[in-house]
Amino acid sequence: MDEGADREGGRPRCHPPVRGEELRGGGKGVRGWQVEANPSDAAVRRHAYYPESPFPPRWFGLRLYEFEGKEIFKRHGIPVPESYLVKNADDLASVPDDFYPAMAKAQALVGGRGKAGGIVKVSDGAEAARAVERIMSTRLRGYEVASVLLEKMETVVDEVYVAVTIDRFEHKLVMIGSPMGGVDVETASKEHPEAFHKIWLDPEQEVEPYMGRELAHRMGFTGKQMASVGSIAVKLYKAFKASDGKLCEINPIGVKEDGSLTALDAVFNIDTDAFYRHPEFKEMGIESGRHEEGELTPNEAKARDAGFPFVDLDGDIGTFPGGAGFGIASIDLIHIYGGKAANFMDSGGAPSQEKLRAMLGLLLDDPKVKVIFGARFGGISRCDDWATAVVQFIQENHPKKPMVMRMTGNMEAEGRRIIEEAKADEPDLFAKITIYPYTTPIEEVVQEAIAVAKAEGGGA
């Protein structure tokens, strides 16, 4: 479809790709800005944790609630739906009847609120009261709900995605835009990398209106809608810089029938170290301690009390590593071979038996964990101590979850002897426990763990 076929203010179903080398001398050197030459290049998709995704993790920086992010949006001229912030049914008394239908949205510092039941449609005040009471009495994926944003329901004909963040590899700020709004962008960017377009800017550089229009053009917009979407992207960039942002995202921007736009969601993370120079945040009621990226899930709190680092993830393969390096490597390998890790944790050097058993206990009690994957390298710590902890844990707890493990290094032979003797004495109890020697490549052990997770009903 050529541009002459585009309707004014409309968007073609498939817009011809615009390559970077066709734009302003290869997309570089014009006042410091840069467009990507090919959105499918690995450099476009990479980031420090999952190479397929161009997006930083959701805990990247000090997080704001949705209503706080939208308040900043409004201050920078980004339109948002009419809304009321409530904490109980009594707060609904100020909401007029003609405000409905509306969306009741849990204000919690966690993603996936809709899938977790934290976002529901309400038709009237009675439904809103029931929804608010239910939402406020629950935790979303382990996080407390601070309040409920009651937002007037908007009728839209299209949804798009725009974000601004830091590209730590290019050492630049980057605007990201896609016609695929209202979806899980991490997944969508893996499956359709060509649909996500990026423009980089030097941190000291001011954004210009034509840069926003260029991004909107690459997203497939023309005419008035190209100008409107581009204007939102520029305003988002300015809000990001003015707030010392780390991640600023609208997913989705709703396109109304008359062509006007509204921000239907807000993800806004700011630099914790820059909080002190933003008195306006304190005026808004934002407190760094309340919003810290380190707000703990129940598992993370238990691990902290037991004395070891633990990070909850979304997968179904529990990792029981011998150290931080092996833990990170395990997560990478699980991801590379198509699985998803349920956690990261680190036992530290020469951990006690109690600590090792506490680590296993968290994985045993976590319902999302289908298999426990253990990778132990005995250096300062000893494989026989690790094996003793595993055996004692199994004898004390009789776990039903399978374990797939590999150990090598200091006192490996003694560690294997301890486990093999325990399996010989109680074969039924240890039937689901598999320990591989150092001669088995770690890649094979990881693939076995993924297969076991799948057999146990996991999503790997």
Image (cartoon, helix red, strand yellow):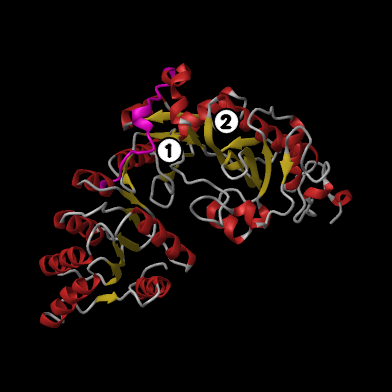
Task: Say which of 414 and 398 sits in front.
Answer: 414
The residue located at (71%, 48%) in the rendering is 36
Residue occupied by mark 1: 124
Q: What is the spatial separation of the Cα atoms under label 2 and label 1, in whole angstroms?
A: 36 Å
- Secondary element at tag 1: loop
Q: Is residue 189 above or below residue 242?
A: below
For the question of whether residue 358 can be seen, the reply is yes
Circle number at residue 240 = 2
For the question of whether residue 97 can be seen, the reply is no
The residue located at (32%, 61%) in the rendering is 319
Amino acid carrying mark 2 in the image = Phe
Residue 3 in percent (x, y) is at: 86, 49
The residue located at (60%, 30%) in the rendering is 79
- Secondary element at tag 2: helix
Q: Is residue 83 left or right of residue 163?
A: left
Task: Say which of 383 and 253 sits in front.
Answer: 383
Residue 201 position by quadrant: top right
The residue located at (73%, 44%) in the rendering is 35
Task: Say which of 236 and 104 sits in front.
Answer: 236
Task: Say which of 169 and 268 sits in front.
Answer: 169
